[in-house]
Image (cartoon, rainbow, N blue to C red):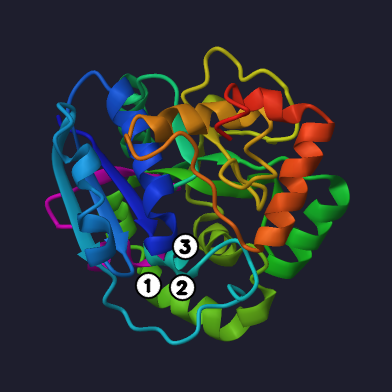
Amino acid sequence: MTQNILYCFDENYNIQALASMISLLDKVSEPVNIYVIHKNKKTFIEKSKKIGTHPNIKSLNVYDFKNKILNFPNISNSHVSEATYYRLFIEDVIPKSVDCLLYLDCDIICVKDPLEMMQNNFIKLSSLNKTIGVVFEDFPQEEQDEIRDRLNIDIQQYFNAGVMFINLTRWRISDVPNKSMEIIKNMGSKLKYWDQDILNKIFNKDLYKLHSKLNFIVDIQNTLTVPQETIFIHYAGSFKPWTTRGAVEKNALMYMENFRKLGIGKFHLTHTWKLSSVFHVIKSIINLKIINTKAPFKF
């Protein structure tokens, strides 16, 4: 059975998504279907040619997000865009013929073939009669208390939504879009972690716990070795490997290696404020972290 992968993003994450996709396609042992829900698919279609001819892509299906919601909560001045909320509306976009899929954030890099694990987890979801399979977050006690009180959920079950194995048959009968809109209406600014908070409220008791190797969160400043059994690494949080501050860290190498496969440059660097980027480059020269890039002069 061909496996289905879903991404949701906008034009600001086109390159990151392609790097994630190429890492996946290079590792899978059989062709997969990739689905994309996009804010403006025209900006991605041209760039998607970089992966469109890959032997491990069976189909690439790109859709514009049609649900014109005016105000998604708490996206101003944050590292996320409104596209993070698009996954709440999967059932409005993905064909009815698709009964299960794996959702991946764009800051995910695949380091090992996930197909056998995907098949096993979808079978497990069905046998347990659960909607999603996820990896739980590990929070300090103070933050656990804050999340529990804010969302009124079992904090022991709070998960990171960057990797989700989804039983779409059950998802479709869970009324996720309407439940999500009701939560947005009632909570709004209280949604600190955006749609992840919403998903946790909806599925707090309807989930299956996955091994952390399926969503290994990388602290880019921490040189902790990624465990050998890891399948997906996740550059979660606001500190990313495509910034000048993050690109000089050792843990950025896995991202840059996959970006280079796209044939569009040696380094992928974005700049919120160029003066700050210059400062971090100078700092990396002084503290010698620029050596971590493996090509300091090109960097």
Which label sits in the foreground, 1 or 3? Answer: 3
Q: Residues within 10 Å of mark 1 (few under 14, many from 20)?
A: some
Q: Relative to residue 172, is residue 177 drawn left or right?
A: right
Q: Relative to residue 218, is residue 121 drawn left or right?
A: left
Classify the position of the C terminus by image quarter: top right
Residue 109: percent from the left, percent from the top? 46, 33
The magenta-colored residue range is 88-105
119 inside magenta stretch: no
Q: Are dots 2 and 1 in contact, CB under 8 Å?
A: yes
The label on residue 84 is 3
**Residue nearest the observer in this picture, 127 or 139:** 139
Residue identifier under label 1: 177
Can residue 119 be seen in this snapshot? no
**Residue nearest the observer in this picture, 239 or 291:** 291
Question: Mark 3 or mark 2, which has the lower sequence index?
Answer: 3
Disc 1 secondary structure class: helix
Q: Are dots 3 and 2 in contact, CB under 8 Å?
A: no
Which label sits in the foreground, 3 or 2? Answer: 3
Q: Relative to residue 187, is residue 114 drawn left or right?
A: left
96 inside magenta stretch: yes
Q: Residues within 10 Å of mark 3 (few under 14, many from 20)?
A: some
Residue 249: percent from the left, percent from the top? 69, 31
Q: Amino acid at mark 1?
A: Pro
- Residue in the picture at 35% in, 51% down: 7
Question: Mark 1 or mark 3, which has the lower sequence index?
Answer: 3
- Residue in the picture at 62% in, 37% down: 247
Residue identifier under label 2: 180
